[in-house]
Amino acid sequence: SHALDPEDFRALEYRSDARVAAAYESLQSMAPTTAAKGVLTVNDIKDGNSKAIVLFFSALFLAEPPGMDKRADQENSDDQQTQGDDLVRMLQEVAGVVAYDSLQDPSFLLQGEETLTGLLKMPFPELLLRWMRIQ
């Protein structure tokens, strides 16, 4: 077996334009939202802009948390559940609005003289049925 040697990672220090462009394209294809796509630029990757990189990966991990699907299949202690919930909350704080697509404007669901306020007071099952009929 081969022992881990820091020299094995030396090549990662060299940021060629081609490598940066490939990384950027790959990350853009994984962006969970339109807003997340706009967070990260080629220069952010090239310059190591940690703020943009952390923001992007926080949004990505909220959309597809690594290993979290396994958590549901296994019995976990309350401590493990709390740690998972704490991690999600932390990622949500970091990612903010870029983690989730904004809600669509619901005005297309209005009928007649109905107002948005009235629409928002509608029971959820009725609202869902109306939305399904329009789709």
Image: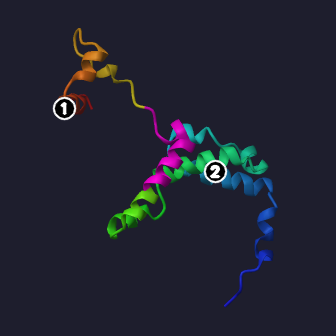
> How many dots with numbers?
2
On the image, numbered disc 1 is attached to which residue?
129
Q: Specify start and end residues of the magenta stretch as a single range.
A: 85-102
Quadrant of the image occupied by residue 1: bottom right
On the image, numbered disc 2 is attached to which residue?
25
The amino acid type, in three-letter code, at marker 2 is Glu
Disc 1 secondary structure class: helix
Q: In the figure, 107 relative to 27: above or below?
A: above
Q: How would you rate the neighbour count of disc 2 (Cα within 10 Å): few for under 14, some for 14-19, many for 20 or more?
A: few
Relative image position of residue 131 (x, y in whole percent): 25, 30
Q: Nearer the viewer, residue 81 or 120?
A: 81
Residue 64 in view here: yes
Q: Is residue 80 left or right of residue 92?
A: left
Relative image position of residue 87 (x, y in whole percent): 50, 54
Disc 1 to disc 2, C-alpha distance: 39 Å
Q: In the figure, 57 relative to 131: above or below?
A: below
